[in-house]
Amino acid sequence: MGLEMDPLLHALSYFRRRKFQLCSDLCSQLLEKEPGDQAAWCLKMRALTEMVYVDEIDVDQEGIAEMMLDENAIAQVARPGTSLKAPGTGQGAGPSQAIRPLTQTGRPLTGFVRPSTQAGRPGSIEQAIKTPRTAHTARPMTSASGRYVRLGTASMLTNPDGPFINVSKLNLNNYAQKPKLAKTLFEYIFHHESDVKNALDLAAYATQHAQFKDWWWKVQIGKCYYRLGLYREAETQFKSALRQQDMVDTILYLAKVYSRLDQPLTALNVFKQGLEQFPGEVSLLCGMARIHEEMNNISAAAECYKDVLKQDNTHVEAIACIASNHFYSDQPEIALRFYRRLLQMGIYNSQLFNNLGLCCFYAQQYDMILSSFERALSLAESEEEAADVWYNLGHVAVGIGDTNLAYQCFKLTLANNNDHAESYNNLAVLEMQKGHIEQARVFLQTASSIAPHMYEPHFNFAVLSEKVGDLQRSYIAAQKSKETFPEHVDTQQLIKQLKQHFARV
Amino acid sequence: QDLICIQSVDGMLMLFEQESYSFGRFLPGFLLPGPLTYSSRTDSFITVSSCRQVESYRYQVLALAKDAETQETEQQKIGSGKKLVVDWISNIGEQALDICVVSFNQLVSSVFVLGERNFFCLKDNGQIRFIKKLDHSPSCFLPYSVSGTVINTLIGNHNSILHIYQDVTLKWATQLPHIPVAVRLGKLLNLKGVIVTLSDSGHLQCSYLGTDPSLFQAPKVEARNINYEEYDAEMNKLQKIIKEARKIKDILPKSENNEDFALAVTVLPDLDSVSQAVDSEIKAEVIPSVMIKIKVDSTLATRTKLTVGVPSPLALTQNSFILELESSVSKTVVLSAFLKGNYLPADLKGSVLASYNTPTGAPRVAQCKFRLPLRLVCSPAQPSKTASQKLTIDTNKPTVSLITLFPDFADQSDEDQINVLGFQLLAGSRVTLLASKTSQRYRIQSEQLEDIWLITKELTLRLEQHFGRQNCKDFVCTFSGPIPLQDYFDIIDHHFELRLNAAKYEQLLAERAIQFRAIERRLLARFKDKTPAPLQHLDTLLEGTYRQVIALADAAEENQAIMFQAFTKLKSATQLVILLISLWQKLSADQVAILEATFLPLTQNTQELGWEECVDASISHLLKTCLSKSSKDHALTLFNQLCIPKDTSRLKKHITLLFDRLAKGGRMSLNPDLDCHQAMLLSGGCDTIPESDFEERPPSQNSTMFTNQGHLDKQDIKP
């Protein structure tokens, strides 16, 4: 048979099967033969874009500069429950800090890592810069734009002989008049080249050419504005797009703008309106849950996650968050069931086994603890993960009263991750029990310098100093503890006691 | 009657009636072929075009439009079919993979479109019924109606998972052994509802949705029989090792003689005939340089990194080497040292550090120290009679001729040089060395106190060498005092003043930076405003503040450079003072070591933690412990945090006190001091602390718990 497949159709088939490199190579051959072949050109652009495509909704990075020069802030001090910046001011429906640990930004630990989990909103630029820079800190990046530039240069790897299209030489106005090419070209410039400025130019011409009737272009302009940090402008574009056509993505973008503008309540409203249009849309429910969680409204977040599971019972994020919520509200058996569900779904990693082991321990299913942790250790991909597993093993050892083993476990944690403040704190407690005061003090000081957001080291230090008789230091440390966790009863009592002492003197 | 429609890659729709060709039409605005389907209820063809729109063409319109062939001749393929009018358009904003029309009954039918990121359901007039955002990139889909009431959709994705949705609700998810490229429902023999999937490689699979969950089987860790006795024995052994390891207080392992690796340094006695100096700041005609040879001998084949360090402002032509050693072959590297900065070094000692790995992978270091010749920093000169700083060193032996002591500086012909020798420091003043003809004394004089140090050190060293060669064991140098404390304090004050300056600059810089940011923020707000207000000279203000910031930074940098020089001078003077006091009070070597440790902390001299407070803390510690007069001084008060003091009077007082006590015969030792320190600790630690007061940190559930699978994929792409 002399019949060969049309090369363009072949390339298209590669594209459908997501074999983008083959597709792009084939298109390059076609373009060599006929440089003006628009179809091949367009297909190659699409293939290159797909190679580096990341859903823009998931990209969430805020640099110091963006945070500090935030001129969108309405009030210096937000009213309680209306801001993401002061998460502690929410309804306080979740378990207290003593039970559920906080991250460095003062939010309770979440069950699922997403790009914005670790974003912090420090109060001033000095504070932002002074945040200790460890592997898992909340220190924001210096600049988000810089990162986009790097993303852009990194995409050159996909085509080593220089860029496929020299964007700066294109006549954008010309292309904007060809709707069939313009959209593909835009995505290429935006995602592959990360050249927001040119992308915005192209989108602006195109939307003009479409007589402002194409919602798609408005969303793209909004995306560009968002990246440029012009949130209010992005908001108008997204709103205008929504007036023309309700789309899930547009709603998500708009909500993202609002949460960046620190208006979580408006964002929640957007989600609610979106849910009226698209009832049961998982991404909208999930977005609501995230905002509730960021505002420390854990029970509302859990409700949303439950709704998510009603729509999609394989949603990993929802299962993990509900499980961790159950765990911290003292229901390890139920958490265990959720984690088992994840295991059944084929998730097989160190974190899951670690959590299973912990749940087993607290649910008093002692036969499974060690084998779970053993698996977790064998699956740990990085030293940080191994450190966390050892840390939790140390807890188990404390729980069964084997302080020797606990000591060694915490030491191993530190061997794996030298910044593990919790381990330092617990080691200090163990040292205290042995009577090594000086050693304990050193550990506590290390812990509090690594993790100033934890109240435990401060409080322990206060107790320790008080016992030794160093009331002044005890008072200072107790004050710090109170600062991080104002409701802590023991701290309050200690401070009261110290004040009585001072009064007597 | 069957009609067949064929879409070609270039966008022509060809329609056949049975086997006869009836007509062909070009679609408008065509670039790449999209999915195509026929809706019988509306009698139209529905496709997704390159403009990312769902377009519907009525059959009648197609049939009546201009013929493709005639078009082609007129307008060359593209831009054809101007008369081809679209029935409706729905903009979905993405490319589609597949399109399908499903009708419940004759009344309602829906158009299902599988996009690259979303799954759409449209009414047959193009309005969106619902959208479902997909987490993973889909590969194929099949909507079908169940018993005429609900519509289910099978969606396969590139993670080889088949999802079954009822509208937007996920009903079932199942794992497939391959990535499906097409999916259909079939009826095989009497078996209804078989899911038939086609893989990339052409394999066809018929499957059904079992109620048996395919439980994920975690791989076995490694089955083994536990031998408790063996384990106990091993555990005990390990515990013992751990216990042993914890007993050793000293972190550093005891140094063993390392025969595998040898490092030898030779400093050539003569200066280089051609100077090797580069980039020196000194304005002399010839900057002396001296060659250093480092020989590395190793029995191991290993990769070694050599690092050579000399005190600044001395510099080296090259200060690090990477050597690929072969076993039992020695390697030699050659480099030159010279004076770079325009001031005097505080020391002439250098060191070579070699780091390598043993074959077992353990990292090791070897170190070797060397001393650079005095000629590197000074040259012979005419002695000068006048000097403000004079020091006299007494000895118990007759004076030695300076020519024999300093052969490298002396001019043999000049008879005067037996007693008088002049040194011109390359970056400093002139130092004159006088040997008394009658008494057993040497006098060193110069304009600057710190300049005397190098010559004095050299003199004592050479004297000891000289008498050592003559086997005179009882040679002693002494110094009758008094120690030039006042000049020393002046140097301290100078250094401290510079530190205060640095603090001032830092504060000013912070203020200006805050001002700069404030202006910047205002400007930004102005520029972003839709109706820009006048700048009101904010730009001038910004420019001015920027200039101020830069000027301040420059000044701070300059101050830092001066401070570095001042610190080197301070180090020189300190060493001189220590030498003098040790000669004066005839301190033993370990006493000198304690003094050196007190006065020359190893820490870097930084703004936060500087020399003054470090030394003050160490001296007050000495004064309170081993040099204390009364027992009440022993009561240790805890030091506050070290911070830059307000002035140096306290430090000066302490230094004077220290020297006083030393002069009165006080001797320092570390051991009693340590004991008393520990006793204090124990007395404090007697109180037992109830356990309940301490809080265990609640178990941190790993904050890195799960990353969504889809998410992971995306992150991989991100570099």
Image (cartoon, rainbow, N blue to C red):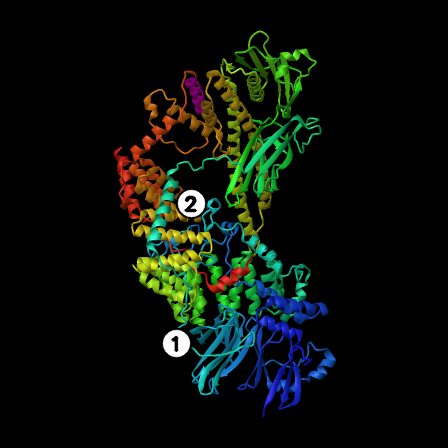
Q: Where in the figure is residue B103, as x and y percent of width and height?
A: 49, 84
Residue A185: where, in percent of width, then height? Answer: 62, 66
In the picture of the structure, the residue carrying the numbered disc 2 is A450
Residue B301 lies in what quarter of the image? top right
Query: How many marks can you see?
Result: 2
Q: Chain of mark 1?
A: B
- The Cα atoms of the two marked residues, 1 and 2, are separated by 51 Å
User: A444 or B118: nearer the eye?
Assistant: A444
Q: Nearer the viewer, residue A210 or B213?
A: B213
User: Residue B305 at x, y = what percent?
Assistant: 58, 40
Would you call the spot at circle 1 few (<14 residues within 10 Å), some (14-19), or many (20 or more)?
few
Q: Left or right: where does residue B671 sit relative to residue B274?
A: left
SS class, disc 1? loop
Q: Residue B579: percent from the left, percent from the top?
A: 51, 20
Any part of residue A344 in sight:
yes
Question: What residue sits 29% from the left and 59% below the top?
Answer: A364
What kind of secondary structure does the magenta stretch mostly adopt? Answer: helix
Mark 2: amino acid: Ile
**Image quadrant for the N terminus of chain B?**
bottom right
- Per the rendering, the mark at residue B211 is 1
Instruction: Name the kind of residue labelled 1 in the image.
Output: Thr
Q: Which residues are magenta?
A: B647-662
